[in-house]
Image (cartoon, grey):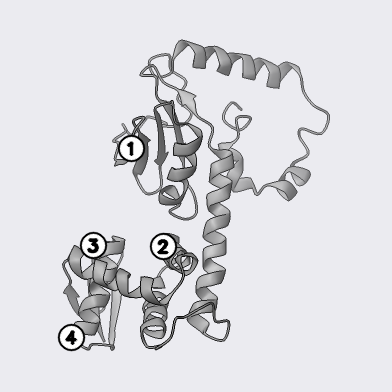
């Protein structure tokens, strides 16, 4: 079995698909270069990303499926599941091999898998949109750090751009080590570097946060300490409404 490696980008994957059809090689696997572990007898080739070829594949899909199905397909890429490229290639072959426009087809395994997986990614998207809790830095940038199960930053950028149009903000994905920054005009992809002993989310130093933010943090701590609610420590009830892995995004969790 021959494995083609790409640079991990969506364009890189589509570029491999173009070469697969161009060379008529349907017996290959496509994997991310940074995640693949080479087997002892495996033939591995790195495939460069060619944007023009990727655009041709995307244009071909755009002619055969609806925008919603394209978004679902993109969500499969954002899921970052191991070997998800196999299902994505299977869906592309199913779509391009059909002469007519392809709608949602529950009889096709690739189409069904794509619909189910995209729902999980969208669910994570909506959770992050509701759980992001900005903190104001001394640079007048509203900042928060998240670590979602799926790579949802490309999906939530539009939501925050529309709702925080008059503020500089930065949302950083700690797990994937990149963020999205809004400069009042456009949303840009950024990468940050932290010291090993620096906690990017719970650092409460006055050198980082603005005076108003420090004041609000102190007020919230006092309220949480001095005004306890009777059922606030009912962890069983809390887990019924929200899994424990999301508690770290709550203001209550960041001060205890």
123 vs 240, nearest the viewer: 123
SS state under label 4: loop
Mark 2–mark 4 distance (CA, rounded to whole Å): 26 Å
Q: What element carries label 1?
A: loop
| Callout in the foreground (2, 1) | 1
Q: Position of residue 81 (x, y in %)?
A: 43, 66
168 is higher (above) or lower (below) than 138: below
Q: Give me the disc on residue 186.
A: 1
Confirm whether residue 31 shows in the render: no
Find the distance from the CA under tag 4 to the CA under tag 1: 39 Å
Q: Secondary structure beneath disc 2?
A: loop
Picture disc at residue 22? none
Q: Earlier in the sequence, mark 1 or mark 3?
A: 3
- On residue 80, which mark appears? 2
Residue at the farthest right position: 230
Q: Marks 2/3: CA distance?
A: 13 Å
Residue at coordinates 52% horizontally, 59% vertically from top-left? 121
Mark count: 4
Q: Do the residues labelled 2 and 3 touch (CB within 8 Å)?
A: no
Is 71 situated above or below 152?
Answer: below
**In which quadrant of the rendered view does residue 253 lie?**
top right
Q: Nearer the viewer, mark 2 or mark 4?
A: 4
Mark toward the viewer: 4 or 3: 4
Q: Mark 4 or mark 1: which comes first in sequence? A: 4
- In the displayed structure, would residue 211 be above or below residue 102? above
Percent across and percent down for residue 27 are 28, 88
Task: Give the quadrant of the N terminus.
Answer: bottom left
Q: Between tags 4 and 1, which lies in front?
A: 1
| Residue for badge 3 | 7
According to the image, label 4 marks what residue?
23
Identify the residue at horizontal 44%, vertical 38% (top origin): 161
What percent of the width, then of the height, locates residue 217?
56, 18
């Amino acid at each position: 079995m021959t494995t083609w490696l790409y640079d991990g980008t969506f364009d890189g994957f589509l570029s491999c698909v173009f070469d697969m059809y161009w060379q008529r090689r349907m017996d290959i696997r496509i994997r991310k270069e940074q995640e693949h572990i080479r087997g002892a007898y495996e033939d591995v080739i790195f495939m460069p990303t060619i944007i023009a070829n990727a655009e041709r594949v995307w244009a071909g899909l755009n002619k055969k499926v609806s925008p919603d199905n394209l978004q679902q397909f993109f969500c499969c890429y954002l899921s970052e599941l191991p070997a998800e490229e196999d299902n994505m290639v299977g869906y592309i072959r199913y779509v391009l091999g059909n002469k007519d426009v392809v709608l949602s087809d529950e009889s096709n395994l690739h189409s069904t898998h794509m619909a189910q997986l995209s729902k999980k990614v969208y669910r994570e998207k909506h959770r992050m949109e509701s759980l992001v809790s900005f903190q104001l830095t001394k640079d007048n940038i509203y900042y928060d750090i998240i670590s979602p199960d799926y790579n949802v930053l490309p999906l939530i950028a539009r939501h925050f751009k529309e709702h925080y149009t008059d503020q500089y903000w930065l949302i950083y994905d700690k797990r994937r080590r990149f963020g999205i920054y809004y400069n009042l005009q456009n949303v840009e992809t950024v990468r940050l570097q932290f010291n090993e002993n620096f906690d990017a989310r719970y650092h409460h130093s006055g050198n980082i946060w603005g005076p108003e933010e420090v004041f609000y943090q102190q007020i919230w701590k006092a309220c949480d300490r001095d005004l306890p609610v009777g059922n606030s420590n009912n962890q069983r009830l809390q887990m019924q409404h929200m899994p424990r892995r999301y508690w770290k995004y709550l203001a209550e969790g960041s001060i205890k």
